[in-house]
Amino acid sequence: MEDKGQLTGVPIKLVMALVIGAMVMGIMTQFVGTAERTAMRDMHVSLDRASKGYLKVRVEDAQSGEPLDGATIIVRYPGGTKADTISGRSDGSHTFRIPMGGKSYVLVSVRVTCPGYIPWEGEVVVSK
C-alpha cells in the first residue's frame, strides 16, 4: 500500500477548515488599507435665488473650497426635472431657469452627487 500524497489519520473536517481559513485570509488581505481609499468627503452646496425665476447652484469641496468638477446637479420642480454635470467651469456652478407655471413661487428640490463625495439634498423656494 502506497501512502504518498495522502493525509492519513487527519480528520477531513480539519483539512477543510484549514483550506477555508487559508482562502478567507487571502480574500481579507485584499481589503487591508482600503478604508482610506473609500472614505467619502463632504461637499458644500450654495443656492442663489438672486434672479427671479432662476436658481444658481454652486458646488465645492467642503474642506478646500475648490469647485467640484464632475458634480451632477438634479433640480426637480412641479412639472419637470433638469440636470447638469459641472465640467470645466471655473466657478463650479450652473444656473437653472425654473418654469413658474403662472405661480408666484415654486418649491424646488435639489440633489447633487459627485464621485467620492457624500450626496447632498435640499429644497429652496424660487419666486417670480
Image (cartoon, rainbow, N blue to C red):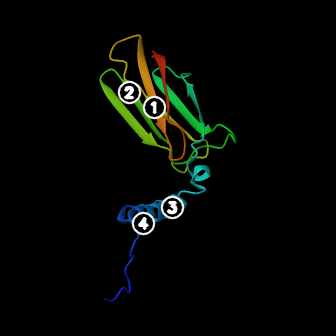
Q: Secondary structure at mark 1?
A: strand
Dot label at residue 111: 1
Distance from disc 3 to disc 2, alpha carbons, whole Å, reads 47 Å
x and y percentages locating residue 62 in the rendered image: 65, 37
Which residue is identified by label 3? 25
Q: CA distance from mark 3 to mark 4?
A: 10 Å
Whole-Å distance between the Cαs marked 2 and 1?
Answer: 8 Å
Residue, x 56% and y 22% (percent of image)?
Answer: 50
Tag 4 or tag 1, which sits nearer the N-term? 4
| Foreground: disc 3 or disc 2 | 3
Q: Say which mark, if any, is on residue 76.
A: 2
Quarter assignment of residue 75 = top left
Residue 101 percent location from the top left of the image? 32, 17
Asked if the residues shown at circle 1 and circle 4 are in contact, with their CB atoms under 8 angstroms apart, the answer is: no
Nearest to the eye among marks 1 and 4: give it: 4
Which one is in front, 61 or 106? 61
- Of mark 4 and mark 2, the one earlier in the sequence is 4
Residue 122 is labelled as: none
Q: Within 10 Å of the Cα at label 3, are there few (<14), some (14-19), or many (20+) other Cα atoms?
A: few
The residue that disc 4 covers is: 19
User: Around disc 2, counting alpha carbons within 10 Å, would you say few (fewer than 14), some (14 to 19), or many (20 or more)?
Assistant: some
Instruction: Examine the rendered structure and indicate whether residue 99 appears above or below residue 70.
Output: above
Which residue is rendered at x = 54% and y = 61% of the image? 29
Q: Are marks 2 and 1 in contact (CB under 8 Å)?
A: yes
